[in-house]
Image: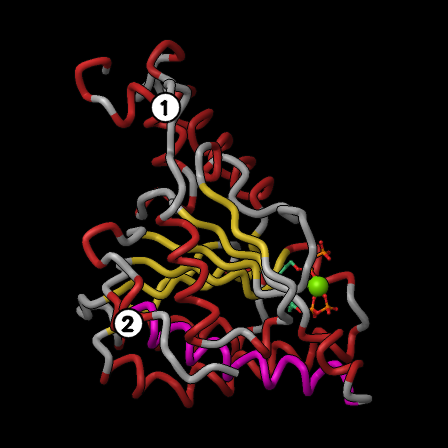
Amino acid sequence: MASKSLLPEINIERLPKHVAIIMDGNGRWAKKRALPRVVGHEYGVKSVRTVTEAAASLGVKYLTLYTFSTENWNRPKLEVTAIMTLLVRTIRKEVATLQKNNIRLRTIGDIKGLPTDAYNELLEAMKLTENNTQMDLILAINYSARWDIIQATKAIAQRVKSGELEVEQINETEISNALDTGHFPEPELLIRTSGEYRISNFMLWEMAYGEFYFTDAYWPEFDKESFYKAIIDYQKRERRFGKTSEQITDHHNA
Ligand code: IPE
Ligand code: IPE
Ligand code: MG
């Protein structure tokens, strides 16, 4: 591989504020090497560390990692247990690195539905890092976009029922704020690894105008340079939000 870094090609003035990643392909990465799937997840943690540090040092403000979906409970029990154990172990081990890099840990998803030790570990790490300001690392755990839309709908319905909100006041802002992702700006860029071209129940509302970037690399192979490459690709795109290209590039037509 060429040793020249892509870093100088990144325009720091035009970074996405929020990058989200569907970290996929741990199992296939392991299978290709005749290793158990769990080993793939362990190597996936290395990529988490690398990409988190790369994003934070670039100046990305929010990094969301799709860690465990509501659908992932349907995997073999042994794999689910192994992922949960790895989660606890990783958070315990990495919290010092988060502190060192001034990164605040957050989550989206129904974390109350996690095994107690995983839940407690997450709460503790979030508490410890709550005053950090360089970047928010948001783990989507026991998350799915439809789960989030349902819980947001229930919360809004409750407010209407109690008379706090009129039906006519329900708008995009109210819905965005009621979602678990409501604390964060919407991702401008969503990366999916492993050559799959689907969204797998992730950020269905938030990605209404987000940019997609797909790569064939399995998640354990995804490194700093792969991340830079995705950012550079994103920066070449023209985001039109329904307008014409002329309106975007020529301000007299706007
Ligand atoms: C992503 O890798 C990790 C999780 C979904 C937890 P996979 O485990 O889905 O890997 P593949 O898709 O089977 O290769
Ligand atoms: C999506 O990956 C979920 C996470 C990365 C946590 P999956 O591997 O579960 O997605 P599908 O089921 O193949 O679409
Ligand atoms: Mg997968």
Residue annotated with mark 1: 245
Nearer to us in this view, 3 or 10:
3
Asked whether, in this view, residue 73 is left or right of residue 153, the answer is right
Q: Quadrant of the C terminus?
A: top left
Q: What's the amino acid at mark 2? A: Lys
Q: Is residue 140 magenta?
A: no
Looking at the image, is mark 2 or mark 1 nearer the viewer? 1
Q: Determine the secondary structure under disc 1.
A: helix
Residue annotated with mark 2: 127
Q: Is residue 44 magenta?
A: yes
Where in the figure is residue 199, as x and y percent of width and height?
62, 46
From the image, give the main secondary structure of the stretch colored magenta: helix
Q: Determine the secondary structure under disc 2.
A: helix
Q: Which residues are magenta?
A: 35-56
Where in the figure is residue 221, as x and y percent of width and height?
58, 78
Asked whether, in this view, residue 77 is left or right of residue 94, the answer is right
Nearer to us in this view, 97 or 70:
97
